Amino acid sequence: MESIIREQYLIRIRPYYDSDLIKVITGIRRCGKSIILNQIINEIKTKGVDEDRIIYLDLEGISGRDITDRRSLEDYISQRIKKDDKYYIFIDEIQNLPEFEIAIASIRVSFNSSLFVTGSNSKLLSGKLQDRLTGRAKEFEIYPFTYSEYLEYKKINNIPLSNDDFKDYLTFGGLPQRFNENNDVEVRKYLIGLYDSIIKKDVFDNHIRVNKNVFKQVAKYVLSTSGRLFSALSVAKGIKKNATNKEVKSFSATINNYADYLKECYLILECEPFYLKGKERLNGSRKFYAIDVGLRNALGNVLDLDDTFALEGIIHNELLYRGYEVKYGKLRDGEIDFVAIKNNKKCFIQVAYKIDTEEVRTREYGAFKNIKDGSPRFVFSLDEFDSSNNGITHINIVDFLLNKVDISLS
């Protein structure tokens, strides 16, 4: 399969190609981080950089099989660098290397180089690496294909387009390697297999005290119900039905930790609250969205596509991809699905599957009634007719995902 050029990411990374900042590219496994590294390498070559000044190591592949610790990495880089000219160093899946943060800091100060690393852990820049490299690293998060990238990938690889493309994307998501499978059954097997591999490598191998059976229960629940408010206390009560209050409270802390482990390996993204009126307690509730709707559906056995939460997840991740900060709006007596923020401006967004009854119309358009803020308001749905009213703009979800219409901020 031929790769698409992921310009939305490259345009953000290009200004740093020659910078001494460490470029840290993070995201879930198999979302295309290595492909982006190769695209950066190709662009650097077109600038006239000799091949011998480009060093690439995949710490999960053949090129990195002899790199087992920081010393072996430092020795390898030292042997490869022969000139005073700038070298471009690319290290894939850096988190697999013990004491990688020491090695990276050493390479950065020891050589005239531009260093790029990838990792499948969201804490890569908030742990030991950040402690050593405060202000010396720049992170770029990569996501699975958006719907427009999904269509571009199909076109470039001569995969026939159909009227069911959005239904297929809504069902199986945008992880690139799913296109290597021949039918729906095989795609689902691939997604479940990828999930199992991520859980083993990025959770069980890193957190050896995890109760694997309980973790699997919690992980499946969090992913398959993503978009709904998540209460660790409620889940704890459901699992520990005969436990004391003290035991349940203690267990709920463990469940919150398990949710954080899912965040670490990018299976879920947390959506924080934006308080539109007051700042009341949330009783420990949190909101998550799956990094990929296909993973969500495969684990939850979701067959009903009339699922607003799946659509919410797609919109949430699309907004992040476009560079917005995304929160959910919290009112004393309700919620707004999303507050999209950029450059200190914002808008409010409600997401619905279809606005096909007066009850749904009242619920979605009425959600804004207690907001005094005059920022733009939008209702997203799959309806093709325009139901805009009372200053609230209706947007067709597919049109938005294909950049035919856009939101505005104030």
Image: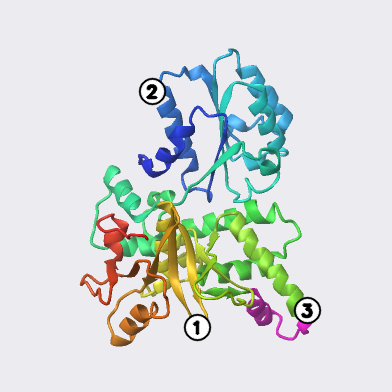
Name which of mark 3 and mark 2 comes first in the sequence: 2
Instruction: Please state which amino acid type lies under the numbered disc 3.
Output: Glu
Range of the magenta residues? 232-246
Residue plotted at (62% across, 39% down): 135
In the image shown, does 278 or 63 lie closer to the viewer? 278
In the picture of the structure, the residue carrying the numbered disc 1 is 333
Task: Provide the residue designation for mark 3.
Answer: 247
**Residue 317 shows up from this direction:** no
242 in magenta:
yes
Amino acid type, mark 1: Asp
Q: Nearer the viewer, mark 1 or mark 2?
A: 1
Residue type, numbered disc 2? Thr
Verify whether residue 51 appears in magenta.
no
Mark 3 falls on what kind of element? helix
Residue 311: percent from left, percent from top = 39, 67
In this rendering, the label closer to the viewer, 3 or 1: 1
Mark number displayed over residue 46: 2
Is residue 398 in view? Answer: yes
